[in-house]
Amino acid sequence: MAVSTGNPTTGGVNAGCLTLDDPWRWVSAGWRDMWAMPGISLIYGVLFAGVSLVLAWSLFYVELSSIVLPLAAGFMLVGPLFAVGLYEASRRLEAGEPVSLRDVLLVKTASPAQLAFLGALLMLALLAWMRIASLLFALFFGLEGFPPLPDFLPTLILTPYGLALTVVGTAVGALIAFIVFAVSALSVPMLMHRDMDAVSAVLESVRVVRDNPGPMILWAWIIAIVMAVGMATFFVGMIVAFPLIGHATWHAYRATIPD
């Protein structure tokens, strides 16, 4: 199958030229890509949702259900890495090349070593976030262990210390998430697509976010909301949410990074 999206934004824009309409255009383009190859996109989504569900169930099984929430938040930090196959699918669709499930699951990236290096940095960011979340819990509740998730949620909402932890944790998490977003939002698809070093890709991604704060913050919010809805539906919604954001991220990269 070989279909072209005819994306009018391909080729990049000058710094500071994005508008608040652009993130919605990327979502629209991602939606078109997803339904141009629904079998491939939805299978990818099913695989991602299945792995996420198994991981969450495993945490409940070993009585670590309370870390599901911070882990789910931190999982978004490394999400761009897992969407590389979706970037490749949209690239092939854009170029009019045939798209197969094998091509999507076994992507031949242009900068494999550099992408692996960036992936290691994102994994370190995830581990750092989990450690910070544990330290914040200890700061407000002492050294007692995490309660089970059914007890943990009322504690966060109905107690003074829980509310304080929720506010502080949300603020700290949002700061970390935005820093990682600036680093990885465009650098991951860039390294998949181009033969270049990770530092240059990261700097270019940060430049776009710095020069277009309004549109890129809106884009970050769209990603967070769509993924949160996917998780809140016991990961069933991830079957659509993850491919949608993955395809849209490719269009965000193509619209903002000049050829």
Image (tube, rainbow, N blue to C red):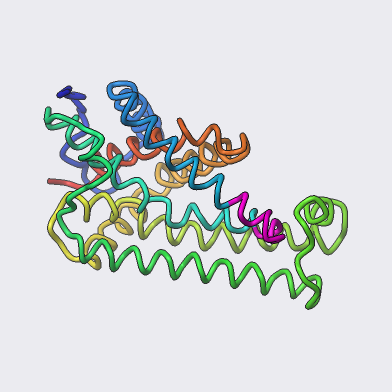
Q: Quadrant of residue 65?
A: bottom right
Q: Quadrant of residue 179?
A: bottom left
Question: Against 227, is 195 above or below?
Answer: below
* Residue that lies at the very extreme toward the front in this rendered image: 61
Q: Nearer the viewer, residue 165 or 255?
A: 165
- Quadrant of the image containing the N terminus: top left
The residue lying at 64 percent from left, 57 percent from top is 59
Give the main secondary structure, helix, strand or loop, of the magenta stretch: helix
Q: Would you say residue 44 sits in the magenta stretch?
A: no
The residue lying at 52 percent from left, 47 percent from top is 52
Question: Against 250, is 34 above or below?
Answer: above
The magenta-colored residue range is: 56-67
Q: Residue 187: x percent and y percent?
A: 28, 55
The residue lying at 53 percent from left, 32 percent from top is 237
Q: Would you say residue 61 sits in the magenta stretch?
A: yes
* Residue that lies at the very extreme toward the right in this rendered image: 159
Q: Nearer the viewer, residue 74 or 186?
A: 74
Residue 145 lies left or right of residue 236; in this view the side is: right
Q: Residue 254: x percent and y percent?
A: 22, 41
Residue 15 lies left or right of residue 174; in this view the side is: left
The residue lying at 22 percent from left, 39 percent from top is 102
Q: Residue 206: x percent and y percent?
A: 33, 59
